């Protein structure tokens, strides 16, 4: 199976938030394929702590197996002090941060109410849960990493968003949060571009994460055309090694379209189609 350009990111240091599983795990593995040192943050360190498989230690070990250097860094991205300590550790140990992937996200415990329930029948904490870890946490991590990248006059911040930022998906709180993630990238790019730092918002398609696959026949998404979690990671690796990436700063970028322009494929050798042309509800 074709992989990311081996060793293209050798010498680069990346922080991937929420890397126990899902897109975060896939991104970490793809950056490992490219030879990067990847700090994998998240809460899950022991199997069984989550209903879904995956821990930060497992992800970090796989990054190293792939040819990179994986480092597990336990961090609750809902706790600013833990995030600050995590970033300080990376800088102390490596002296730089080249890539920040803002991926950490939290879903409410009442997942059965996420889909098909009008917003006024959903608990108010849905808003707080998905915006605290998933929007605010992206801002906090970026605030802490930006001075490092500004000093370097080099860096890439990639926010993991979704098509939900541009049209109805899941529910009101989710969509507003993703639209906020997109705006966060655009406005941070305004401040960081003069310092050589690029900020983008990435829109994957339907991704075969552990959570999505666990829905089985009850999955609320059209699974006829899907992407692996590593597909998004390959997009980030391509951006991180693109000397012209500042031309894309501040933009919402569709992962499948980046694959076409950069010429990379998914892990099975396919090139998933962009969802841009597919109708969305709402």
Image (tube, rainbow, N blue to C red):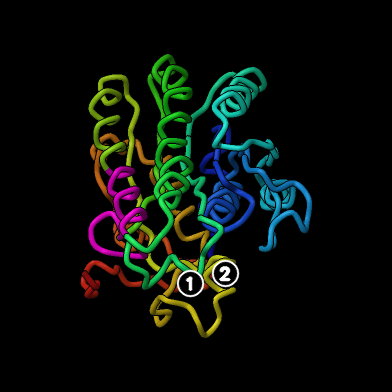
Residue 1 belongs to magenta span: no
State how far apart marks 2 and 1 are (Cα): 6 Å
Q: Residue at x 57, y 46 (%)?
A: 18
Quadrant location of the N terminus in the rendered image = bottom right
In the displayed structure, does residue 200 sit left or right of residue 148? left
Residue 242: horizontal and vertical position, in percent?
Answer: 36, 41
Residue 166: horizontal and vertical position, in percent?
Answer: 23, 57
Tell which of 255 and 133 is nearer to you: 133
User: In which quadrant of the rendered view does residue 271 lie?
Assistant: bottom left
Name the dominant secondary structure of the magenta segment.
helix
Range of magenta residues:
164-182
Q: Residue at x 66, y 63 (%)?
A: 52
Tags 2 and 1 in contact by the CB under 8 Å rule? yes
Residue 233: horizontal and vertical position, in percent?
Answer: 49, 53
Q: Residue at x 30, y 29 (%)?
A: 188
Query: What secondary structure is found at the residue carrying circle 2?
Result: loop
Quadrant location of the C terminus in the rendered image = bottom left
In the displayed structure, does residue 121 sit left or right of residue 48? left
User: In which quadrant of the rendered view does residue 239 lie?
Assistant: top left
* Image height of 218 relative to 161, above or below: below
Tell which of 96 and 229 is nearer to you: 229
Residue 178 belongs to magenta span: yes
Residue 50: horizontal and vertical position, in percent?
Answer: 69, 57
Query: What secondary structure is found at the residue carrying circle 1?
Result: loop
Residue at the bottom extreme, as displayed: 217
**In the image, which disc is placed on residue 269?**
1
Residue 17 appears in the figure: yes
Residue 262 appears in the figure: no
**In the image, which disc is placed on residue 212?**
none
In the displayed structure, does residue 206 sit left or right of residue 68? left
What residue is shown with label 2?
1
């Amino acid at each position: 199976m074709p992989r990311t350009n081996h060793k293209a990111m050798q010498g680069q240091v990346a922080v991937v938030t929420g890397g126990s599983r899902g897109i975060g795990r896939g991104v970490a593995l793809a950056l490992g394929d490219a030879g990067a040192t990847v700090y994998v943050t998240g809460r899950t360190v022991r199997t069984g702590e989550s209903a879904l498989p995956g821990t930060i230690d497992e992800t970090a070990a796989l990054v190293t197996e792939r040819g990179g250097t994986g480092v597990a860094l336990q961090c609750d991205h809902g706790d600013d002090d833990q995030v600050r300590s995590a970033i300080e550790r990376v800088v102390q140990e490596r002296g730089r941060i080249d890539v920040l992937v803002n991926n950490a996200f939290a879903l409410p415990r009442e997942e059965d109410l996420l889909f098909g329930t009008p917003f006024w029948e959903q608990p108010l904490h849905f808003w707080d849960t998905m915006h605290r870890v998933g929007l605010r946490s992206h801002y906090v991590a970026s605030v802490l990493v930006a001075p490092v990248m500004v000093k370097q006059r080099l860096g890439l911040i990639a926010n993991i968003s979704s098509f939900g930022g541009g049209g109805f998906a899941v529910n009101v709180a989710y969509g507003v949060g993703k639209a906020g993630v997109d705006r966060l990238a655009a406005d941070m790019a305004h401040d960081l571009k003069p310092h050589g730092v690029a900020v983008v918002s990435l829109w994957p398609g339907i991704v075969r994460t552990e959570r999505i696959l666990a829905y089985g026949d009850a999955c609320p998404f059209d699974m006829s055309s899907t992407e692996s979690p590593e597909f998004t990671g390959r997009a980030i690796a391509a951006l991180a090694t693109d000397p012209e990436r500042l031309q894309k700063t501040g933009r919402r970028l569709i992962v499948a379209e980046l694959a076409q322009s950069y010429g990379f494929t998914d892990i099975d050798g396919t090139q998933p189609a962009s969802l841009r042309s597919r109708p969305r509800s709402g």
